[in-house]
Image (cartoon, rainbow, N blue to C red):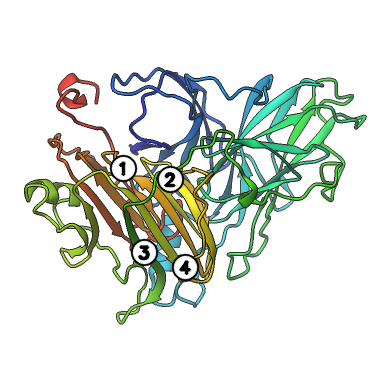
Amino acid sequence: MSQITLKMLQQYIGMAFSKIKPTSTTGRLPLPSVVYRLVNPLYTISRSENFLELLGGNSTQYTDGITGALIVYPSDPAPRGFPTWDQDLVVQVNDLYHTFSSVLLAAYLSPFGIDGTPGDEPVADGGTLNGLGQWGGTGNYFNFTVEPNKTYRIRLINTGSFASIRFSIDNHPLTIIEADGTLVKPYNVSGLTIAVAQRYSVLIRTNGTRKDGTYWMRSQVQTDMFTYDVPGQNTDIRGVLRYSNAQNAPALPTATDDPGPGKKLADMDDSLLIPAVIDTPPNNTRRYPITVALENTNDGRFLAFINRTSWEPLTGTSTLLAVHNAGGSSYAPNGGSLQDSSQFLITENSIQTVDLLINNLDDGDHPFHLHGHRPWIMGTGSGRYIGQPLNTKSPLRRDTVLIPAYSWMILRFITDNHLSKLAYGLSTVISHGIWPLVYSCRSTVYPPLPPTSRFLSLLYTNVARNRHCWCNPIHIQAVSRCTRDFCPWRSGLR
């Protein structure tokens, strides 16, 4: 029995209602839809419109397992004049590995690496679109049947493990209206590239003029991060958008090469995403520099490092329990410190506005999450940060970013949430409270911990695979929140 974990944009928000549409990442038959009603008396959803991922995983099992989409609707209306649509569609795209992740992981961690070069990540054999894909000249195509002359909102999610994926629809421009729960000003593109764990919403108008009424949806697995060849690899994954008045309903589209949207449009440039509602961030009160690198060690391993520290799991406990048992603020001093030889921490004892200056010193692009927060992207650029001007007026807020090789990014957030996780290797942030944690490879759930008035950031990495990159040995997830007023353990809601 695998733990099912919800990766959500802000872990403390309450959910009025939600819908899960699970599909298999391995091409197996889609699972039935399930409707849940989740109630949290502490919070309600306001403007943010979120669609999230439901993950099933034990160690690296996520790569071999199932995912689903959870749509969370906001209680506040969209801004005046914001586009409307007739119906929602959900599209999950991902890379696909024919070898089980446990085998790939063992090869990756071996002294010679998976292909003879330590540090080369496993390369995908193909991909899927809503659980279906093609390989070796055969396969199945996921099909959407749509009504002509309607507007559809397509919610796109990259539920993969390593590769970014470009999405487009033949003869249909895409209008981006949302990124990771943040509404953006409508932006017309030919296609868009989605990093692992990122989510976008695009609008399409079903006014195509092809007589057969069928169009390819293209999910192209990007190969720029691949370091060796895989025999038979197929990176051109397709689905079908079919008009309800199509002349020959079962037929596949006839186009081979991508004809584009029919208009002279470029692909998405994420620097051109502008928030639909301006949300000016407060001035920062703290700044912490973080360097990220993957390096060989003296014992022949290829590990990921944050600030020259490669994380190792604590034995018989967790960092949260260690903090609690030490009496909270006595566990680590304010600011940055190294605890238990492998636990790099940044600690704040009050609410602060923190800038995380992340320098990616690796030769590969890396997705980063800040769970529990949707930080402002204050600035990004190639090379090292040496005082370049930041966007202090209208920065985009999102929880998942891609930092290119040899580049920097500044993320700003307020330490007003009990837990967040900066996931590269994996990093945990605890602010003004403690959430009990559960390891995905264990069945034990620790008892509730009392709240504290503490902000603690644990930055840790190691080499093993998770959904963001191959450098997280154990995917740790918060399972609930305990306060003086509400405790799911005491109320029986766990």
Between the residue at mark 1 and the residue at mark 4, the CA separation in whole angstroms equals: 32 Å
Label 2 sits on residue? 375
Precedes in sequence: disc 2 or disc 1: 2
In the displayed structure, 285 sits above or below 7; it is: below
- The amino acid at mark 1 is Gln
Between the residue at mark 3 and the residue at mark 1, the CA separation in whole angstroms equals: 22 Å
Q: Position of residue 254 (x, y in %)?
A: 87, 41
Between the residue at mark 3 and the residue at mark 4, the CA separation in whole angstroms equals: 11 Å
Precedes in sequence: disc 1 or disc 4: 4
Q: Position of residue 182 (x, y in %)?
A: 53, 36
Label 3 sits on residue? 290
Precedes in sequence: disc 3 or disc 2: 3
Between the residue at mark 2 and the residue at mark 1, the CA separation in whole angstroms equals: 19 Å
Label 1 sits on residue? 477
Judged left or right of residue 267, residue 215 is right
- The amino acid at mark 4 is Tyr
In the displayed structure, 74 sits above or below 351; it is: above
Judged left or right of residue 129, residue 213 is right
**At numbered mark 4, what does the secondary structure look like: helix, strand or loop?**
loop
- The amino acid at mark 3 is Ile
Precedes in sequence: disc 3 or disc 4: 3
Whether residue 59 is visible to the viewer of this picture, yes or no, is: no
**At numbered mark 2, what does the secondary structure look like: helix, strand or loop?**
loop
Front disc: 1 or 4: 4
User: Is the residue under label 4 in contact with that under label 3 (CB below 8 Å)?
Assistant: no
